Image: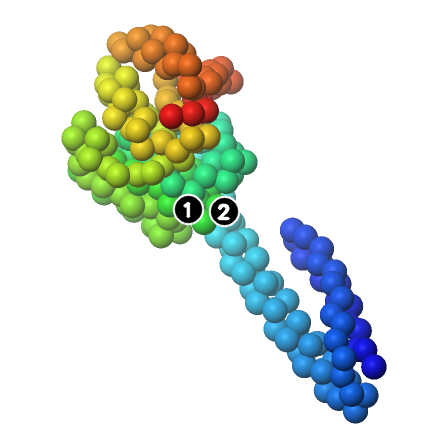
């Protein structure tokens, strides 16, 4: 005879429904049914634990951002811009990010939070030791340290030494070096990856030249997020 099992499982993200069919003697059917049910219950329990853990991290990050919403100075991005970066990473499922210019870590929190959802990690570079140490404290308080590789270094030197590959880059450091940062990291950016840059509509020295350059590249598609009061360039790499 054949023994049929149909299991339907519903969790936060998907519905699983399948049938198992194999020959088995009648006297063993109750034992097999028990083992399948027991295994399925364990699996569902583990899934519930994992979802609960993610939910707890989200709640911790949300609380951190709410508690510190009015505290960010020192060349940090505004919350709306952090949300934009976070949403790009999550929607594209990017897992290997580089941030040039940590400051005290507001943008890094948004990037790392996104990485916690995609299973990735962000390398972030800051040259100022005070800001670097404060960023580490902020990331620890937000519960995101495991998703960040923070470097105290001169990005002029470090960026061109990084091996990558990266699928997401955020540039928010010395504006007159934007074009050089782009040239240094471009070879390490994966096809379909994204390079973003902050303050591109603020008329800082070097930003116009940077925008003219990236918009002229045939293998990139660039748009400007003008919802940001500072302007964020968003460039997707279509081919090497």
Which quadrant is home to the N terminus? bottom right
Which quadrant is home to the C terminus? top left
Left or right relative to 211: residue 113? right
Which residue is depicted at the point 47% across and 36% down? Answer: 89
Which residue is depicted at the point 23% across and 32% down? Answer: 159
| The disc label shown at residue 229, or none | none
Which residue is depicted at the point 57% across and 67% down? Answer: 46
Q: Position of residue 187 (x, y in %)?
A: 30, 29
* Whether residue 5 is situated above or below residue 99 in the rendered picture: below
SS state under label 1: loop
Sort mark 1 into few (<14), some (14-19) or many (20+) by Cα contacts within 10 Å.
many
Q: Position of residue 177 (x, y in %)?
A: 23, 18
| The disc label shown at residue 120, or none | 1
* Whether residue 179 is situated above or below residue 127 in the rendered picture: above
Task: Choose mark 1 or mark 2, whichever is in front.
Answer: 1
SS state under label 2: helix
Question: Quick check: marks 1 and 2 in contact, CB under 8 Å?
Answer: no
Who is closer to the viewer here, 87 or 6? 6
Tag count: 2
Look at the image and tell me whether residue 120 can be seen: yes
Q: Position of residue 188 (x, y in %)?
A: 31, 33
Q: Position of residue 223 (x, y in %)?
A: 48, 16
Which residue is depicted at the point 40% across and 51% down? Answer: 143
Look at the image and tell me whether residue 134 can be seen: no
* Whether residue 41 is situated above or below residue 192 in the rendered picture: below
Could you give the CA–CA distance between mark 1 and mark 2, rounded to whole angstroms? 8 Å
Who is closer to the viewer here, 230 or 24? 24
Q: Which residue is mark 2?
A: 117
Rendering colour mode: rainbow
Who is closer to the viewer here, 96 or 109? 96
Left or right relative to 158: residue 65? right
Left or right relative to 223: residue 184? left
């Amino acid at each position: 005879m054949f023994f049929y099992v149909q299991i339907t499982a519903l969790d936060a993200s998907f519905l699983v429904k399948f049938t198992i069919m194999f020959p088995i003697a009648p006297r063993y059917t109750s034992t097999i049914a028990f083992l399948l049910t027991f295994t399925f219950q364990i699996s569902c329990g583990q899934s519930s634990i994992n979802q609960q853990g993610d939910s707890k991290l989200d709640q911790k990050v949300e609380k951190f951002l709410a508690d510190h919403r009015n505290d960010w100075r020192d060349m940090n991005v505004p919350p709306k811009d952090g949300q934009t970066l976070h949403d790009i990473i999550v929607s594209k499922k990017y897992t290997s990010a580089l941030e040039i210019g940590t400051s005290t870590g507001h943008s890094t929190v948004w990037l790392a939070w996104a990485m916690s959802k995609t299973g990735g990690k962000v390398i972030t570079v800051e040259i100022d030791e005070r800001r670097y140490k404060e960023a580490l404290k902020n990331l620890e308080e937000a519960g995101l340290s495991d998703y960040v590789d923070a470097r105290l270094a001169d990005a002029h030197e470090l960026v061109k030494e990084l091996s990558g590959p990266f699928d997401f880059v955020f540039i928010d450091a010395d504006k007159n070096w934007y074009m050089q940062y782009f040239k240094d990291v471009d070879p390490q950016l994966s096809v379909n990856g994204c390079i973003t840059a902050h303050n591109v509509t603020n008329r800082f020295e070097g930003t116009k030249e940077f925008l003219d350059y990236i918009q002229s590249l045939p293998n990139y598609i660039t748009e400007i997020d003008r919802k940001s009061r500072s302007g964020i360039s968003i460039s997707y790499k279509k081919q090497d």
